[in-house]
Image: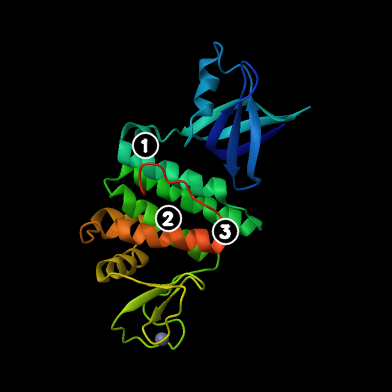
Amino acid sequence: MQKIKAIVVKSNDRKEKDKNILLFSIEQGKFWATLKGVKGANAKMKLAQNPFTFADFVLEDGKAGKIVTSFDCIESFYEISQDVDKYFCGTAILEIINATEFSSENETAQIFVETIKALKTLCFSNANPIYVLDKFLLSYFEKFGYPIYVHKCSTCKTVAFDKIFFDYQSGELVCQKCKTFSCEELANTTYMALKILSNCDFDTLKTVKLAGESEIGLLRVLVRNFEARFDKKLKLIGILS
Ligand SMILES: [Zn+2]
């Protein structure tokens, strides 16, 4: 028997009455476990199939993998599912976790902490949900060792930008002189959004006000950077079409 703190990333149907849930924990990263009989009368266990649920799970090793024998909810993040904008951004965060391959315990632990911070901000503050998603991606790149330095050209180090480009090959900013075929010019408002969100944290996000729609422009850049770096497609339903 093991007890583990984890977040429910997603759930799939298994046999008639069972569900499989993908859990994300500090200790074991991502792994699947089975919820038995959740489509029957066991109402308490039903809650353990809801994405976002953060709980203490008690697990046992069964013949076909881990089985959840009980769980104790720490935070359901219920409010995220009650607001469509929060829901889409929260689902995007879980989609990013779903697409992530962790290569060390340190990486897993750091991303876990950022995920909880992002979900808490999304759930309990009135910060713009897209700002939360942008901030999560910025922290994510940093924790994976790919921070985006916002004040200088990553190639020639100049701080005097006329135009700013995002280099999807390196995942960094470059100036006009240093741009290559893999670069895309950033709108000034997108660059401002990048600078502002890089310099705040989840706690202060609710006080941030970005120029109209610049959070979406930035999100496009960050998602494209994610896909280029990790060679994975992200399906961000309801946000980017
Ligand atoms: Zn340069």
Which amino acid type is shown beneath numbered disc 1? Ile
Against 236, residue 49 (above or below) is: above
Assign a secondary structure to mark 1.
helix
Residue 205 makes an appearance in the image: yes
> Which residue does the image show at 59% across and 37% down from the upper left?
22
Mark 2, residue position: 136
Q: Position of residue 185 (x, y in %)?
A: 34, 73
Mark 3 neighbour density, 10 Å: few (under 14) some (14–19) many (20 or more): few
Which amino acid type is shown beneath numbered disc 2? Phe
The residue lying furthest to the front in this view is 181
Give the number of the disc on residue 80: 1
> Which residue does the image show at 34% across and 86% down from the upper left?
159
Which amino acid type is shown beneath numbered disc 3? Asp
Q: Left or right of 135: which side holds 170?
A: right
Mark 3, residue position: 231
Spatial CA distance of label 2 from label 1 is 16 Å
Give the number of the disc on residue 30: none
Spatial CA distance of label 2 from label 3 is 19 Å
- Occupied quadrant, residue 21: top right
